[in-house]
Image (cartoon, rainbow, N blue to C red):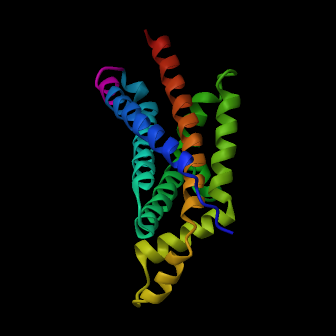
Amino acid sequence: MKMMMTAETRAGLHRDSVECIEIYRIKINKIVELWNNVPNSLDDLLNIDLFISMKLCDLFVLIKQYTQADQRWEGICIAGQIYTKMNESLKKLIGFNEKGNSNSYWIKVMGAYAQNDPVLYPEYINIKKELIEYAQDKSIQNYIKLIRNTDVHGDENLDSFTLFKILKEIDIDYTFRLFVEWGKLLRRTSFFVSDCYQKKFEKLK
């Protein structure tokens, strides 16, 4: 059963998205400024935080667009972009299987940095666990794959009627609830990475 988002929830999301776009726009500029002025040993941490911050900016732009959409086809189009953004973020941060996990930025860079810090390590593990849960959630991943492969990549044969049927069945409000929850995890991840390089920067002074 599809659940409709209330007007009050939609208005709240719009206000939050406008505010957060500005917050992450400022943060992106600060990261780039830091990158130009701090030791090279911080490059990997800044690189990850810049990636996450840009994805968060994308996320809030899409949420803002959704809150202003007044036709279902607009929502369908934005939902397709959401699944693509989630897929690419997960692939870069944690990967989709054991091999992908071990080669991911989160484990290679953040794991190496946090493993010797008793204060940071528990939160690193918690975030890693939640990222892997998203990446390995079959219901989410199968849906992402279906929407992304049909809408973005398609098939060698043109099958517009299958595509239309799939798009027609998209639960847009569910998609945005999922996206908002994913955004909360990304924000935690960004705060954690920021704490890491601020702490490292203090040691280098």
Query: In the image shown, does 57 or 165 lie closer to the viewer?
Result: 165
Magenta stretch, residue numbers: 32-38
Which residue lies at the image location 51% right of the left edge and 49% below the top edge?
10
Give the vertical position of 145 relative to 195 (above or below).
below
Give the vertical position of 54 relative to 157 (above or below).
above
Which residue lies at the image location 42% right of the left edge and 31% below the top edge?
46
The reply to whether residue 50 is visible in this rendering is: no
Give the vertical position of 202 relative to 152 (above or below).
above
Based on the displayed image, in which of its 4 quarters is residue 35 positioned?
top left
Residue 128's spot in the image, x, y percent? 65, 42
Q: Is 21 within the magenta?
A: no
Which quadrant holds the C terminus? Answer: top left
The reply to whether residue 204 is visible in this rendering is: yes
Residue 40's spot in the image, x, y percent? 37, 26
Based on the displayed image, in which of its 4 quarters is residue 175 positioned?
bottom right
Which quadrant holds the N terminus? Answer: bottom right
How many circles with numbers are drawn on the protein?
0
Query: In the image shown, does 94 or 4 lie closer to the viewer?
Result: 4
Instruction: Spot the residue most to the front.
Output: 7
Q: Is 35 within the magenta?
A: yes
Based on the displayed image, in which of its 4 quarters is residue 186 positioned?
top right
Please give left or right for residue 119 compared with residue 18 in the image: right
Residue 194's spot in the image, x, y percent? 49, 26
Please give left or right for residue 201 compared with residue 111 in the image: left
Query: In the image shown, does 130 or 107 lie closer to the viewer?
Result: 130
